[in-house]
């Protein structure tokens, strides 16, 4: 196997240079062999680039979001953008087969209030048919008609999408306002959380 030279700014503490190999996308100090790519790496001292430094992450295309594994990150998507929607569709289709969604048939329009940067209103529409992901739309204005319409602050939905707040708790504490059958909505809340666990894996700027 031919080796490939890569260059990366990496924080290894006080070291000033490093030569080793790249295995499965990770740097290793072991000598380069046929099973890994050789690496020539420029080291930045810890005092100038820390492991949690936002400049460090941005300069090196590394995500600070633990859901992405932290290294490396191929792309970051703006929340509720068309690009984010497209990535969400790919992941939901792949990772949520009908049996994981309990073969449910339902639709939901999430209405986001006070969206940055101008306080506008946006929507995120989902539709599942017999558990199969059927449709996902993002936009502004009047949302598509759905079995459930759920309105709430942008930051509340962002917390739910990041997996920091469950959909059921948000409904029960009135952080979200529901139009539709509350009993059925609470029964489906666990499926909504399952969906949000997939969305949480998308490298996202909120």
Image (tube, rainbow, N blue to C red):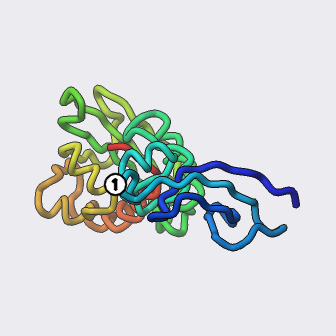
Determine the residue positioned at 55% across, 61% down.
95
Q: Quadrant of residue 37?
A: bottom right
Determine the residue positioned at 38% across, 38% down.
80
Instruction: Say which residue label 1 marks.
Output: 161
Determine the residue positioned at 54% across, 69% down.
99
Q: Quadrant of the N terminus?
A: bottom right
Judged from the image, the secondary structure of the residue bearing numbered disc 1 is: helix
Determine the residue positioned at 29% across, 44% down.
110
Of the pair 189 and 87, the residue shown nearer to us: 87
The answer to whether residue 6 is left or right of residue 146 is: right
Residue 84 on image: x %, y %: 46, 41
Residue 59 on image: x %, y %: 47, 43
Of the pair 20 and 14, the residue shown nearer to us: 14
Residue 30 on image: x %, y %: 69, 73
Q: Residue furthest bottom?
A: 30
Instruction: Determine whether 81 is above or below 20 in the image.
Output: above
Q: Quadrant of the C terminus?
A: top left
């Amino acid at each position: 196997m031919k080796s490939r030279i890569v260059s990366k700014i990496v924080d290894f503490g006080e070291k000033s240079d490093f030569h080793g190999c790249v295995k499965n996308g990770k740097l290793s100090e072991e000598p380069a062999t046929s099973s890994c790519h050789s690496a020539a790496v420029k080291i930045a001292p810890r005092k100038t680039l820390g492991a949690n430094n936002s400049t460090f992450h941005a300069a090196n295309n590394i995500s600070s979001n633990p859901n992405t594994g932290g290294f490396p990150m191929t792309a970051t998507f703006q929340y509720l953008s068309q690009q984010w929607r497209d990535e969400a569709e790919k992941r939901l289709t792949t990772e949520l087969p009908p049996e994981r969604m309990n073969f449910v048939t339902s639709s939901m329009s999430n209405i986001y209030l006070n969206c940055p940067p101008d306080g506008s209103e946006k929507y995120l529409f989902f539709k599942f048919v017999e558990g199969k992901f059927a449709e996902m739309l993002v936009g502004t204005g009047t949302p598509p008609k759905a079995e459930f319409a759920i309105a709430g602050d942008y930051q509340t939905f962002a917390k739910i999408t990041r997996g920091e707040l469950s959909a059921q708790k948000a409904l029960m504490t009135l952080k979200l306002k529901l139009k539709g059958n509350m009993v059925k909505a609470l029964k489906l809340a666990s499926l909504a959380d399952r969906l949000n666990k997939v969305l949480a894996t998308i490298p996202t700027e909120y």
